């Protein structure tokens, strides 16, 4: 079974930086898209950043210019570099991978276990 394992969360002061990692148990190019979502207490899960297998990236408006999603295909890992962190970035961050299906394979959606990011003011 394919797994996603996140790491890199923690406690940081406002203005600081963290880098999250998400290691997949198979080639990341088996997924059509990978991304990072976050969920703060009492709020819905929201997409923060995504990267398609072909390379294009997208970001949620509040993180543009501060967060960068990237990948290392040799390590089957994606990253989320988070700079200029704000208290409102505090949330559990989840890695996601999507396979959109083909005529011979079913679509599926994978999630990691989540990693806590806490930004103190």
Image: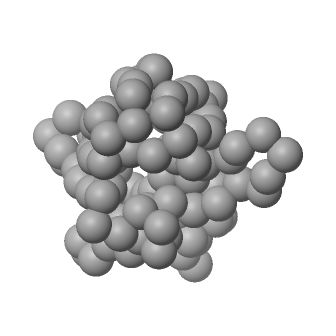
Residue at image position (49%, 52%) is 36
Residue 101: x and y, percent?
57, 71
Q: Is residue 59 above or below residue 22?
A: below
Q: Is residue 68 above or below residue 110?
A: below
| Closer-to-camera residue (87/6) | 87
Q: How many marks?
A: 0
Q: Residue furthest front?
A: 121
Q: How is the image coloured?
A: one colour
Residue 17: x and y, percent?
28, 36
Residue at image position (15%, 40%) is 74
Residue at image position (32%, 56%) is 67
| Closer-to-camera residue (66/44) | 66
| Picture quadrant where residue 55 is located | bottom left
Residue at image position (84%, 46%) is 42
Q: Is residue 40 visible?
A: yes
Determine whether, in the image, residue 92 is placed left or right of residue 78: right
């Amino acid at each position: 079974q394919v797994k996603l394992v996140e790491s890199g969360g923690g406690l940081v002061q406002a203005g600081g930086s963290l880098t999250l990692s998400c290691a997949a148990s198979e080639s990341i190019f088996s997924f059509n898209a990978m991304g990072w979502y976050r969920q703060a207490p009492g709020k819905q899960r929201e997409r923060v950043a995504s990267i398609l297998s072909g390379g294009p990236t997208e970001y949620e408006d509040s993180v543009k210019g501060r967060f960068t999603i990237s990948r290392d295909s040799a390590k089957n890992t994606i990253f989320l570099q988070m700079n200029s962190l704000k208290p409102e970035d505090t949330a559990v961050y989840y890695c996601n991978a999507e396979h959109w299906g083909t005529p011979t394979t079913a679509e599926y959606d994978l999630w990691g276990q989540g990693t806590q990011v806490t930004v103190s003011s």
